[in-house]
Amino acid sequence: MASARITAGSDRPRRRLPFFIENIQNEPMSVTAVLEVPENWKIIPPRQSFELKPTEKKFVIFTVQVPAVNPVGNFNITLNAFQTETENSIGNATATVSVGEVEKISLILVEAPDHVTAGEEAFATFLLQNMGNTQKKVFIETTNSLVEGPQEIPVEPGASAQFRVK
């Protein structure tokens, strides 16, 4: 049975994740390395294949793209290495990636009259978007206008809320 030593190159959270794969045998081997990450994360490249000479150590880097709406927390990722020809496992290593809060709120004007004549009611409709990864409660404050509905609007990650001011 083939065997290899795999270690994470760094335990700090990064988008570029380095690993070492070492052939601890006295025979060459073909190795394929695959990174397992949480759902919806993107991995570049998705897999890497290479030859290792006896006792050779290879430095491999995977780039991981975490979605902006991914929840805050610590997530385990695992590098699995196996022999390319037989698909026998030769080792694995686990690293933890910390995802911090992403705060990204935008306010977009959806509708408003170009001009208002005397006696007409002035209004404006806005779209509040939460493109971050945590729920936010946004307080809408106006001068000389009223917000229809509550002034504090909760918005889930990746969601939008529409409100009207008159």
Image (cartoon, rainbow, N blue to C red):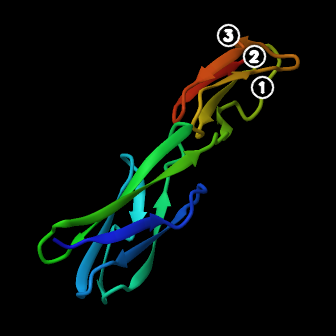
Give the residue at x 45% y 65%: 7
Distance (Cα) linking label 2 and label 3: 24 Å
Residue highlighted by disc 2:
120
Nearest to viewer (mark 2 / mark 3): 3
Tell me which corner region of the image, top left, top right, bottom left or bottom right, holds residue 160.
top right
Nearest to viewer (mark 3 / mark 1): 3
Inspect the image, locate mark 3, and give the three-letter code of the amino acid beneath it: Pro
Given residues 16 and 105, the one toward you in this image is 16
Residue highlighted by disc 3:
150
Distance (Cα) linking label 3 and label 1: 25 Å
Q: From this viewpoint, which residue is outermost toward the right? A: 143
Given residues 110 and 160, the one toward you in this image is 160
Point out the tag, 3 or 1, that comes first from the N-terminus.
1
Point out the tag, 2 or 3, that comes first from the N-terminus.
2
Q: From this viewpoint, which residue is outermost toward the left? A: 86
Give how far across and how far down residue 119 sits, in percent: 79, 13
**Element assignment for label 3:** loop
Give the residue at x 38% y 86%: 56
Tell me which corner region of the image, top left, top right, bottom left or bottom right, holds residue 126.
top right
Give how far across and how far down residue 45 sits, in percent: 38, 71
Distance (Cα) linking label 1 and label 2: 6 Å
Asked if residue 140 is positioned above or below residue 90 in the image, the reply reads above
Give the residue at x 39% y 74%: 21
Tell me which corner region of the image, top left, top right, bottom left or bottom right, holds residue 29.
bottom left
**Element assignment for label 2:** loop
Circle 2: is it few (<14), some (14-19), or many (20+) Cα within 10 Å?
few
Marks 2 and 1: in contact by CB < 8 Å? yes
